[in-house]
Amino acid sequence: MDDKDLEMLEDDEQIVVMSDDEGNEFYYREEMVIPLGDKSFALLVPIGECGCEDEECECHEEDDEPDVYIARIDFDEDGEAIYLDPTEEEFEAVKTAYEEMMNSSEE
């Protein structure tokens, strides 16, 4: 994903860039933020290699349903959001809260 593609996405939605231990960057769209107690958790959806939203594009062929990742949102000393892995208890609590939200919206 080049800088131009990233800029276009950032205008419309929150984009999270995460790196692995080898320095490879992965791009995610912040789909939803779920407040839970005094913490907030983001549901992150991977953005395809090309960064497009076109369902006909090759980057969408592997999975019909993208994986969704849960990340705890903390803030560094400069007030910038940082995304961290939740504990197992936090993960289960967010998962339960999300399921309850989806069930109540279907009613």
Image: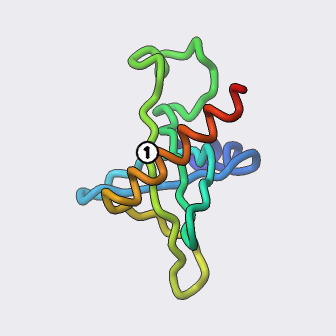
Task: Using a 10 Å C-alpha cutoff, classify the residue at mark 1 as few (fewer than 14 neighbours), some (14 to 19) or many (20 or more).
Answer: some
Image position of 91 (left or right of 43): left
Q: Position of residue 76 (x, y in %)?
A: 51, 81
The three-letter amino acid code for the residue at tag 1 is: Tyr
Image position of 92 (left or right of 33): left
Kindly identify the residue that appears in the image at 31 percent across and 57 percent down: 88
Task: Spot the residue most to the bottom.
Answer: 77
Q: How is the image coloured?
A: rainbow
- Badge 1 element: strand
Q: Position of residue 26 (x, y in %)?
A: 42, 47
Check the image and report above or below for 49 versus 27: above
Kindly identify the residue that appears in the image at 59 percent across and 48 percent down: 30
Q: Position of residue 64 (x, y in %)?
A: 47, 17
Quarter containing the C terminus: top right
Kindly identify the residue that appears in the image at 70 percent across and 47 percent down: 13
Check the image and report above or below for 92 versus 5: below
Q: Position of residue 25 (x, y in %)?
A: 39, 51
Q: Which residue is mark 1?
A: 69
